[in-house]
Image (cartoon, grey):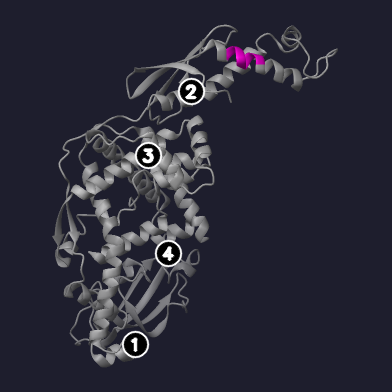
Amino acid sequence: MMEDSYVETKVEALQDNRVKVTVTVDAKDIDARIKKTYKDFAHKYNFPGFRAGKAPRPIIDNALGAEAVPATVTDDVVNETYPLAIDECNLYPVSKPTFAEDMGLVAAGKPFEYSLEVEVKPELELSSYEPVEIDMPAEGASDAEVDDQIDQLREHYYDYEDAAAATKVKEDSYLDLGMKATDDAGEDIASLTSPTRLYGLGTGLFPAAFDAELVGMKKGQKKEFSIDVPAEPTVMTQPLMGKTSKINFEVEVQAVKNKVLPEVTDEWVKDTLGFENVADLRTRVADSILEQKEEVLPRIKENQCLSKLADRLQGDVPEAMCEEAETSLLQDFFQQLQRQGVSFDAYLKQQGITPDRFKEDVKAQAADMTKQDLALDAWARHYNMEVTDEDVAEEFVKSGVEDPKKLQEEWRRNGQLHMVKNGIARTRAAEDVMEKAVVTIVEPGAAADKKDEKKTAKKAAAKKTAKKDEAKAEATEKKPAAKKAAPKKAKKDEAADAEKAADAE
């Protein structure tokens, strides 16, 4: 590639976040490119009567066509200079550029001018630049949190005892159930027939229609009913798909059960959980909560701050940016599945969602990410968070590559430095928003009450601040500096954060 050859760039704002960039390339550079291309063609092709590399220009033009060299030079100069021009103008393209159809070809002794149009990232504003207000769990481990964790442990060691005979079956009851099942032809279904089994309503083993028939029954009562084999089979009805359309049941409630949790005593703690006593258990649980919060609370704070900031964004978010974020999320997701050796179908089944629901979730998350990014951009502009050339160079040094200067130059010539700059600015903006945030400490019980209203901690958008910039950079297979400028988190980590965040609250 020739040395930087455009000598002038002009930017004209158009409608719908589009700009027109006009680039002028110096005549001296055009002549050098034409000379080099003729020489390359003389070596590349065989011209009768001339040794390799010795064919004169008229012979080459006659053999290949008079426009062969100008067309090649034109393509080269445009492809090499437009990324540099976009970067020089500090533009952030969100779509591929379109070039003027009447561009023409280069000519010896003349400067070459061409223009392009491209959609760029909009400069939206926030409704307010005051500190965001968020609720956060306390940093320490309260007695209530320790109690809650211990109660969750007890849930793993429950037992059942018979309830009073007059107790009615409810939607979440457990009961001893005698059952006989037959198919359409009246034949016994051995897999469902049992003289007695412990069954819990709402566990999904049987269809909801089966559970509904049991609600309200008491110990000793019998009942006969039929249900349709569901289109989406449950664990117990899966083997019957295609074999019968209905299942006929004869059931008897032998006992309604009460769940009994173990009492937390020194003896139970030692024999069952392996701790010295209750005090030792509480100390260990408190330590675990503290360790968990040290890891998760910063991420919860970041998620809350970014969500609050995005709510202030004014203006429409470009669809192209949302689509780009969606593509990035899908690439990350399927790479993670591949690393884990899990199929997409298996993932959907495990999560209990349909492909359409998955697509909707990804699209919604991409929109949230884009709003957060544009909100951070607005914050950085408002507070004049300038990114210097030294800042960019430092990012490449931090990447740990053997030759950071060489890599930075490659990125510059590819027109990618704006992604690094943007990543640095967004990271600084996020840190500033978090530092200035007005934080209200919420007691564990209150945090749990608000969990349904505040999904921030459970959002998979627990990303670092310039995920999309890095995704662009990764597409060029030059990753290290972008990872430093815009760190990204694996989906597994995000899911773990969501679970830990819920526990921490």
**Label 2 environment density (alpha carbons within 10 Å; few <14, some 14–19, many ≥20):** many
Q: Which label sits on residue 391?
A: 3
Q: CA distance from mark 3 to mark 4?
A: 58 Å
Q: CA distance from mark 4 to mark 1?
A: 41 Å
Quadrant in the picture for the C terminus: bottom left
Residue picked out by circle 1: 274
Residue picked out by circle 4: 233
N-terminal label among 4 and 1? 4
Relative depth, front residue between 368 and 469: 469
Find the magenta span and give its range.
30-35
Q: Main secondary structure of the magenta part?
A: helix
Q: Nearer the viewer, mark 4 or mark 2?
A: 2
Q: Nearer the viewer, mark 2 or mark 1?
A: 2
Q: Which type of secondary structure does the marked residue at label 2 adopt?
A: helix
- Amino acid under disc 3: Asp
Q: CA distance from mark 1 to mark 3?
A: 53 Å
Q: Give residue 125's position: percent from left, percent from top.
A: 22, 32
